[in-house]
Amino acid sequence: MEIPPFFRDRADAGRKLAECIDRSRVERNALVLALPRGGVPVGYEVAKALQVELDVFLVRKLGLPSQEELAIGAIASGGVRVLNEELIAELRVPADLVDRIAAREEREMERREKRYRGNRPRLPVRDRTVILVDDGLATGATMKAATRALHVDRPSRVIVAVPVAAKETCHELRSEVDEIICAFTPWPFQAVGNWYEDFSQTTDEEVRRLLCSGRAGR
């Protein structure tokens, strides 16, 4: 029997995810960092419900040129690179190809950061509780890169919060952060998009609009 989608769209997922967060444990100076692009509509709803600030945290998946959805790793702001060494070895991906893919994604990450924020600086992270939000976790490579990069900025606590995730990925990430909140861990998992009625691509303009609204509405 096929299981129907659990969320209408990313906004609905964000509202349901916010209900899973214990607000008494979230300080007033907490910060939601959403992974663009799909994590921003989710993070916006979480930040609004918790009445905390919203910003983006730039991370890019490293996908093979012939199979872009197949992640061999990820990069994040600050020069952090997380690679799936076993998959790279299994597929015999040359080191110079990995470097070329990473360089391409670094250029795209810089472009997006400028487009999303404009001239606004990153919100400070040090000594704050940070809630990292995405629209779902499959392999977790992108989120793992984000958590490792974020620790460089010395937040007081790091919480990963997602509407839907593969159960084994949630378990793997627990050692990386102070807390992980997965609202829905279906089995078999298959893919993040399977659990949304509307999983259409989030646009750059939508990200900009939600960021402006999130910063102004606190």
Image (spheres, grey):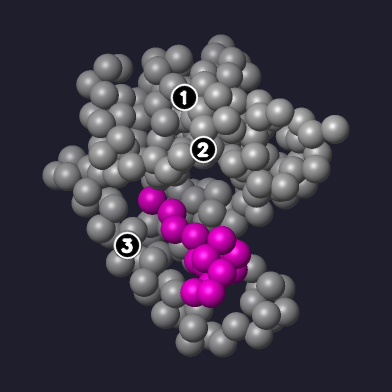
Viewer-side label of 1, 2 = 2
Residue occupied by mark 3: 108
| Residue 27 appears left or right of 139 | left
- x and y, in percent, of residue 151 in the image: 49, 49
Which residue is at 80% across, 43% downward? 188
Residue occupied by mark 1: 11
**In the figure, residue 194 lies in which quadrant?**
top right
Viewer-side label of 3, 2 = 2
- x and y, in percent, of residue 218 in the image: 30, 17
- x and y, in percent, of residue 186 in the image: 76, 35
Q: Secondary structure at mark 3?
A: helix
Residue 62 versus residue 58 in the image, above or below: below
What number is the disc on residue 199? 2
What number is the disc on residue 3? none
Residue 202 visible to the viewer: yes
Which residue is at 45% across, 16% downward? 50
State which region is magenta: 58-73
Residue 165 or residue 176, whichever sits in front: 165
| Residue 112 appears left or right of 22 | left
Task: Tell me how far mark 3 sits from mark 2, CA to CA.
Answer: 22 Å
Task: Tell me how far mark 1 sits from mark 2, CA to CA.
Answer: 11 Å
Q: How many marks?
A: 3
Amino acid at circle 3:
Glu
Amino acid at circle 2:
Phe
Task: Tell me how far mark 3 sits from mark 1, CA to CA.
Answer: 25 Å
Q: Is tag 1's residue or tag 2's residue first in the polypeptide sequence?
A: 1
Amino acid at circle 1:
Ala
